[in-house]
Image: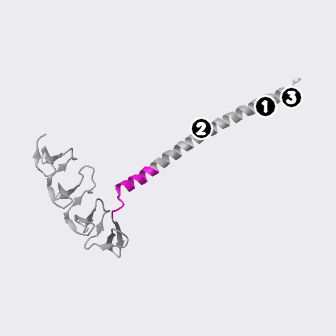
């Protein structure tokens, strides 16, 4: 059995195979780089969004809350430290106010440490609620109401449920009855 071996033909064939292999490797490398760049961009967007969201939600002029020796301190600036009294926890300040707790009940203080809403509620929803701008949802004896930034109960805590603010009114549930009220607690017809 005799083989017809043409070295030039074999070399040309081998060269084409190598060029095809190189082209395939380059195409795979380009696809990998595109995926890598896309993933890095996605990761960067997620990180920037998370940091930007945190910074956007937390204004720079809000005091920081510090815990020292079991006491709770907060400062408008690092050189002006204020001490709270009788509270076991102080949440982050938002809009110049913070929710405080004695361990059982909740209230609200301002940046000067003045109690603007008495510590008597079972729960208080953050005063930066998207549902009630400039108002806090409070729970007392299992019922819901709203307080304003001065600590005044603008909607008495008598409702079983309070829906989100829609314009100037919100839907409430009282027992089996559902109706609308304004931000002062007055019943309104839509």
What stretch of residues is rendered in magenta? Answer: 47-62
Who comes first in sequence, dot 1 or dot 3?
Answer: 3
Where residue 68 appears, x then y in whole percent?
36, 74
As measured in the structure, the alpha-carbon distance from the residue carrying label 1 to the one carrying label 2 is 26 Å
Give the quarter of the image for residue 136: bottom left
Is residue 63 on the magenta stretch? no
Pointer 2: residues within 10 angstroms few (<14), some, or many (20+)? few
Is residue 49 on the magenta stretch? yes
Where residue 138 appears, x then y in whole percent?
20, 57
102 vs 125: above or below: below
Is label 1 in a helix, a strand or a loop?
helix
Where residue 95 appears, x then y in whole percent?
28, 59
Is label 2 in a helix, a strand or a loop?
helix
36 vs 95: above or below: above
**Residue identified by numbered label 3:** 7
As measured in the structure, the alpha-carbon distance from the residue carrying label 1 to the one carrying label 3 is 10 Å
| Residue at left offset 18%, top offset 49% | 161
Give the quarter of the image for residue 126: bottom left
**Left or right of 127 on screen, residue 160:** left
**Residue identified by numbered label 2:** 31
Q: Are marks 2 and 3 in contact (CB under 8 Å)?
A: no
**Residue identified by numbered label 1:** 14
Is label 3 in a helix, a strand or a loop?
helix
Viewer-side label of 2, 3: 2
């Amino acid at each position: 059995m005799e083989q017809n071996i043409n070295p030039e033909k074999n070399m040309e064939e081998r060269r084409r195979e190598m060029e095809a292999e190189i082209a395939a490797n380059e195409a795979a490398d380009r696809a990998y780089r595109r995926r890598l760049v896309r993933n890095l961009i996605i990761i960067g967007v997620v990180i920037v969004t998370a940091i930007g969201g945190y910074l956007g939600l937390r204004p720079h002029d809000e005091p920081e809350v510090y815990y020292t020796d079991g006491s709770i301190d907060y400062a408008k600036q690092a050189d002006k430290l204020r001490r709270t009294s009788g509270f076991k926890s102080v949440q982050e300040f938002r809009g110049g106010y913070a929710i405080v707790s004695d361990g059982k009940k909740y209230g609200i203080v301002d940046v000067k440490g003045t109690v603007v809403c008495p510590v008597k509620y079972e729960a208080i929803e953050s005063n930066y609620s998207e549902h009630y701008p400039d108002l806090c949802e409070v729970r007392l004896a299992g019922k819901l109401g709203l307080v304003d930034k001065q600590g005044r109960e603008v909607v008495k805590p008598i409702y079983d449920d309070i829906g989100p603010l829609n314009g100037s009114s919100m839907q409430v549930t009282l027992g089996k009855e559902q109706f609308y009220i304004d931000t002062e607690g007055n019943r309104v017809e839509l």
